[in-house]
Structures are given as C-alpha cells and as structure tokens.
Amino acid sequence: MAIDLSDYERGAPYPGNYSADLAALQERLARIQVAHIVHKRRAIVLLEGWDAAGKGGIIQRLTAKWDPRYFDVFPISAPTAEEKDKHFLWRFWRKLPASGEIAVFDRSWYGRVLVERVEGFASEPDWRRGYDEINEFEAQQRDCGTTIVKLFVHVTQEEQDKRLKKRFEDPWKRWKTGADDYRNRVRRPAYLDAIDDMFRMTNTRWAPWTVIDGNDKKAARIASLTAIADQLEAHVPMEPLPLDPELEQMVRRELG
C-alpha cells in the first residue's frame, strides 16, 4: 500500500495519561532490551524525518531505561573525507550492532536518496542505484538475524516553522539549528518528491516503513515507542533464560 504523508498531519493531542503511558512503555522497552541481551539478538532502529520533527526527543525517551552498555545512538551528519572516498554504506557497516546490542540511528543511509539527492551531493545515477543498494543492505541484515525498525517522523511546514522559530529564539536550543535548516525549507517540494520515491522503492516486506504524525510531540513519542516496542518484541523471545542450577545452589548456600 502506498504511503501518503497527508494521512499523518492531524496532530491530534495525545488522549491518554501521557506520563503514565510513557513510563509503562519505557518499562516494556527495558524488558525488550534485556531479551535482546540474554538471547543475543541484534536490532537496528532508525529515524528519518524533517528537521525539528522531534526525532531527538523520541530517541531520548526510547533509551531512557536502557542499559547503556548494550546500545549505541549514532547521529548521522555529513560524511568525512575518508567516508566520501568509499562506498556510501561503508560508514554504516562499521556501526552495525553486535549480538545482544541495539543500534539507534538518528538519520541513516537514507541520506543517499534524500538530502544527497535533493542537494546535489550525489549524482543521479548514484542516488538511483542507492535504492537497490539499500534494499540489499537491509536484506543482508535481516538474513543474519537483525531486526530493522524504520520510522519516518512527519510534520507540516507550519509546525516545522513554529519549532524552528522557537529554537532560534531560545539561546540554549539555538545550537540545534543552523543555516541549512532554513535553506532546506524552501526545497520542501523536492524533498516531498524524494520521500515519496523513498517509500515507494524501499518499503519492503523485510524492512517496512512506519510513518509517525509528529505534529503533537507527546502523541508522536507514544506512537513511536509503541511501534518500536511492537516490532522489536515480535522478533525476540520474551522469556527469561532458565535459572542455572549451579548458580541457584551457590546463591542459596551463600545467602540462605
């Protein structure tokens, strides 16, 4: 089924008890992380979306109860000179999770068919070839047992403008914005075309896209964490490992 971003622009306020529901989701996600650790499973969670769509806030709440030894967050920016000299996926291969780990990407390899396409950083043959290269890359990860969760956080131009203005006016948040944020907004039609092609070409059965209506931050956070929890939980055993009888004997002997 085709993905139409206009279906994700209601921005309805979260109807439940946000604090309680968020806390429950974070506890659920904590158990899901433990399941990945003890069962030695790998997972990738990636977030794409507009500037100021709320990706960072979602990641902050996603990882709030996670053991920091078993996950990494990778904020993806422009490639270095060394990375430009190699295939565009090279820098992502180096960040893939090991067994028992979850890797979270704040932007990802989809830059090849989004910003690199729109801003002219990749030639047309390169970004067009990128769709197949990305699909094959993700299929390889799934074939070796890695769960892939892909979220796109959508906000309207009006909502994005409000948030960019708020960032600019707050001296403690101004560091999060730059000239590119304001230059990019005038290219929104070109980005919409690129996003539409991205969904059409890479919404695969092994790595489907989930679109989040980001126009209400609280609703977006709950929807995002729920989608991530559902997809991770579906691909990892959610039973704890059986108790080691030798360890049980030792504990009873030492602690009574």
Image (spheres, helix red, strand yellow):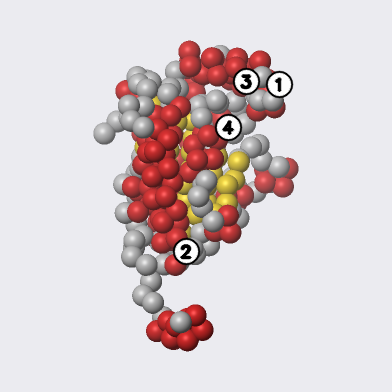
Label 2 Cα crowd, 10 Å radius (few <14 / some 14-19 / many 20+): some
Which residue lies under the disc numbered 3?
A: 167
Camera sees residue 2: yes
Distance Cα–Cα, label 3 vs label 4? 25 Å
* Mark sitting on residue 116: 4
In this view, 204 is above or below 147: above
Q: Position of residue 48 (x, y in %)?
A: 49, 35
Label 3 Cα crowd, 10 Å radius (few <14 / some 14-19 / many 20+): some
**Residue that extends furthest to the left in the rendered view of this protein:** 1
In this view, 192 is above or below 151: above
Between 210 and 38, the one nearer to me in the picture: 38
Q: Position of residue 54 (x, y in %)?
A: 51, 30
Residue 168 image-quadrant placement: top right
Which residue lies under the disc numbered 1?
A: 171
Are circles 3 and 4 on residues that touch, CB within 8 Å? Answer: no
Q: Secondary structure at mark 1?
A: loop
The disc, 2 or 4, on the residue closer to the chain's N-terminal end is: 2
At x 51%, y 52%, the residue is: 66
Q: Position of residue 198 (x, y in %)?
A: 42, 33
Check disc 1 and give the amino acid type: Pro
Q: Secondary structure at mark 4?
A: helix
Between 163 and 157, the one nearer to me in the picture: 163
The disc, 1 or 2, on the residue closer to the chain's N-terminal end is: 2
Distance Cα–Cα, label 1 vs label 2? 40 Å
Distance Cα–Cα, label 1 vs label 4? 30 Å
* Mark sitting on residue 37: 2
Check disc 4 and give the amino acid type: Glu
Q: Position of residue 155 (x, y in %)?
A: 45, 22
